Image (spheres, helix red, strand yellow):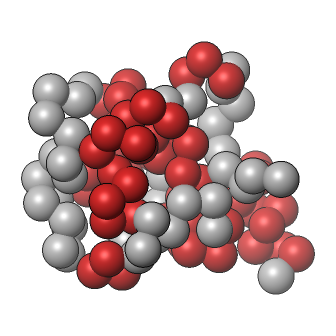
Amino acid sequence: MKRALIIVALLLPTSSFAEVRPEVYERACKLCHEFGVGSAPKPHDLNDWAPRLGKGMKTLINSVKHGKNSMPPGGMCVGCDDADYQGAIEYMSQRVE
């Protein structure tokens, strides 16, 4: 468990808080991710996010853009760009104290 948390911490891109996009999460991601609909990784659950982050941010953004499993292409984020997707992923994959 500790090793997984360390790996997640190392894989998270270093970014300022301004790049993290909780507003995108609230508007477009929360509906499914909050409750893990269709096995969506729950926000701030490092165990859910660790294997996904291990694939790299480009892969995660590509999954959002093109859809994966029960997530439709673009998720629910109409008009989002790669920076929006990355910011939402960074927000959801961070631990909250």
The residue sitting at 34% across, 51% down in the picture is: 29
The residue sitting at 54% across, 51% down in the picture is: 92
Q: Is residue 74 left or right of residue 17?
A: left
Rendering coords of residue 13 (x, y %): 64, 36
Residue 65 can be seen, yes or no? no
The residue sitting at 41% across, 76% down in the picture is: 36
Above-or-below relation of 47 to 54:
below
Above-or-below relation of 3 to 94:
below
Q: Is residue 89 left or right of residue 27?
A: right
Q: How many marks?
A: 0
Q: Nearer the viewer, residue 55 or 93?
A: 93
Q: Quadrant of the N terminus?
A: bottom right
Q: Is residue 50 left or right of residue 24?
A: right
Above-or-below relation of 24 to 33:
above
Q: Is residue 38 left or right of residue 65?
A: right
Rendering coords of residue 69 (x, y %): 19, 75
Rendering coords of residue 38 (x, y %): 28, 80
The extreme right residue here reads 2
The residue sitting at 32% across, 39% down in the picture is: 27
Residue 69 can be seen, yes or no? yes
